Image (cartoon, rainbow, N blue to C red):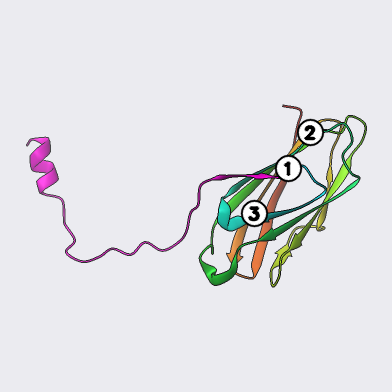
């Protein structure tokens, strides 16, 4: 049997096929600032590059963009770099208007230094709930 015969024998649907879910594969560049907002509707990977010799001791990352339920089930990652050569810093996670952030132990993590990379991953549970399911320190790259 030829490849053409094999393809011809595949079942064909005569109606529309609905595929639910949402994936926006794109890199979002966050500002080099101690208070930033990550709009998940712009992409599922964010890079927060604090590449400066002095990074503020307290940094806040606010998550927005989940309204309407179109992102339900979407996974995302945040790649964060602490360019401070002298000390650990902290990242506190916050939800934008109407969004609750759930996490393991605390809404604040230690962002190790000097010059350390951190990987944060999470899931959009529903339009009002974001779950940070993994926070890992990657160290020097």
Residue drawn at the location 64% of the way across and 54% of the way down: 122
Is 141 displayed left or right of 10 in the figure?
Answer: right
Describe the element under mark 2 as helix, strand or loop: loop
Which residue is disc 1 drawn over? 136
How much space separates mark 3 and mark 2, taking CA atoms? 24 Å
Q: Nearer the viewer, residue 120 or 62?
A: 62
Which residue is disc 2 drawn over? 51
Is 77 displayed left or right of 115 in the figure?
Answer: left
Q: Nearer the viewer, residue 40 or 101?
A: 40
Q: Nearer the viewer, residue 67 or 31?
A: 31
In primary-sequence order, the first of circles 3 and 2 is: 2
| Residue 3 place in picture, x, y as percent | 12, 36
Which residue is disc 3 drawn over? 122
In primary-sequence order, the first of circles 1 and 3 is: 3
Describe the element under mark 3 as helix, strand or loop: strand
Q: Which region shows up in magenta?
A: 1-30
Neighbours of disc 1 within 10 Å: few (<14), some (14-19), many (20+): few
Please say whether residue 14 is one of the residues in the magenta stretch. Answer: yes
Residue drawn at the location 84% of the way across and 38% of the way down: 112
| Residue 75 place in picture, x, y as percent | 57, 53
């Amino acid at each position: 049997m030829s490849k053409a015969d094999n393809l011809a024998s595949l079942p064909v649907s005569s109606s529309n096929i609905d595929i639910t879910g949402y994936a926006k594969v794109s890199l979002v560049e966050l500002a080099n600032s101690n208070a930033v907002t990550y709009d998940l509707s712009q992409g599922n990977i964010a890079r927060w590059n604090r590449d400066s010799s002095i990074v503020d001791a307290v940094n806040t990352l606010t998550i927005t963009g989940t309204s309407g339920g179109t992102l339900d089930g979407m996974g995302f990652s945040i790649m964060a770099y602490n360019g401070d050569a002298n000390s650990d810093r902290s990242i506190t996670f916050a939800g934008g208007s109407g969004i609750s952030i759930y996490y393991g132990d605390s809404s604040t993590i230690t962002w190790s230094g000097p010059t350390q990379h951190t990987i944060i991953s999470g899931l959009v549970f529903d339009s009002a709930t974001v779950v940070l399911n993994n926070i890992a320190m990657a160290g020097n790259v």
